[in-house]
Amino acid sequence: MRTLIIILTTFFIPILSAQDATEVLTKSKQAIEALQTVSYHVDIQQTNPMNADTSQLSSDCFIKLVPIDTIVGMYYYFSTVDSGFDKYNGLAFYSYSPEYYNYIVRYTVKDNPEKFRPMNLPIGIVPSEVTSSFTYLYSLINTSKDVAKMLDYAESRDKSFHFTPDTLLDNRRCFFFKISKSTQKSSWYQSVFIDQSTFLPVYILQNSTGGSIMIGDKNVSVSQFTKRKYSKIEESAPKIDYLLSENSLPKDVEISDHRILLDHLKKGDPAPSWKHPEVSTDKLISLDSLRGKIVVLDFISTWCFHCVEGSLVIKELFKKYSDNKDLVFVNVFSCKTDTKEKIQRYIKMRNIDGLTIYQATSSEKPYGIFGYPNFCIIDRQGKIAFFQGGYSTNLQELLSKEIDQCLGE
């Protein structure tokens, strides 16, 4: 009889645990989806596969769900001590990051609806180090996707799924869930800690090693670790309404509409002058010193996913025009977080070609740079021949066409 009890206990515990896990995860998903106006604090630590650096961000987040907003579905205000804020109030998106520029960039929904659509990026890719990219992608609202993934594994009784009904984390009683997968070349796991009293997420951990994705014809590693901690979760409608209003914008900072920033760089206008150090020698290089040559500028950052795609295009063009002495390719690092050491490591890692200048923050506003990458062609007379903000799949074709036209003049 005793043997039978042991056998039955061994048989039934996994089943009961799976049923409990499904119930907890269902309640957690419902608790997240029930949030309407919520404020919370999030701490994010994440390695970036683009440059192998670890970024840390602490942000106060305020979210108001708005079902009638079919583009985003929520209004938000994300702020950090060192990196300014990002705000979307249904009419416009405002971004202020003093670490990169000293003005507020404004996008209107009417002029640029794509700016407001949810990001859909390859797994393991860090979109940027700007506040909104982290906090929007990893918002408390979006954690329902992580919980739903766990729920799918629990319901399917997948062998990689693990559930611990009771654990202590930061003096908070939590449910613990984990999924782990591995092959000969790569491994991946995700862990979720859910508060036992609120059924809301406390910690979410993700780790992948040995994975890769194709960028152009190159394999790029996406080995990465991400940790998210959510705290101070509460309803706070009045404060959110104030932060979403125009009154919350700082009065002493200039607001620049993104269209104005771009429109001031018209074809045929004189290119803004600059003088910045070259990364290997620290010798100052100026635009004036390159007068008479065609200059291709690639505003780039070490942590940017699409910058890698753009660099592959520049590399192909560098090869194509390698015999032409009238053409100069310049990699421009203007982000303050890109130190000389990071840039040199990135150049070696990505096998970057061309002249590289850095500490170019002062050139961001004159060239309308408020994101990466950006591409600009300056003709022999020092005038703007081409400018494009962001990477596109036809970038190589566009740049080749403009370069050939400049060379033929």
Image: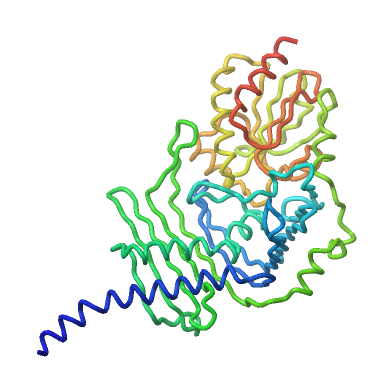
**Relative to 136, is 121 above or below?**
above
The answer to whether residue 82 is seen in the rendering is no
Of all residues shown, which one is farthest toward the front? 68
- For image coordinates 58% across by 22% down, the residue present is 317
Image side of residue 10 versus residue 20, left or right:
left
Residue 275 position in % (x across, y down): 76, 36
- For image coordinates 67% across by 70% down, the residue present is 36
Residue 311 position in % (x across, y down): 57, 33
**In front of the other: 363 or 207:** 207
Image side of residue 304 versus residue 378, left or right:
left
Q: Quadrant of residue 387?
A: top right
Image side of residue 160 versus residue 405, left or right:
left
Of all residues shown, which one is farthest toward the top? 408
* Quadrant in the picture for the N terminus: bottom left
- For image coordinates 76% across by 31% down, the residue present is 286
**In front of the other: 333 or 40:** 40
Residue 34 position in % (x across, y down): 60, 71
**Relative to 99, is 310 above or below?**
above
**Relative to 64, is 399 above or below?**
above
- For image coordinates 66% across by 77% down, the residue present is 234
Image side of residue 175 versus residue 33, left or right:
left
**Relative to 89, is 405 above or below?**
above
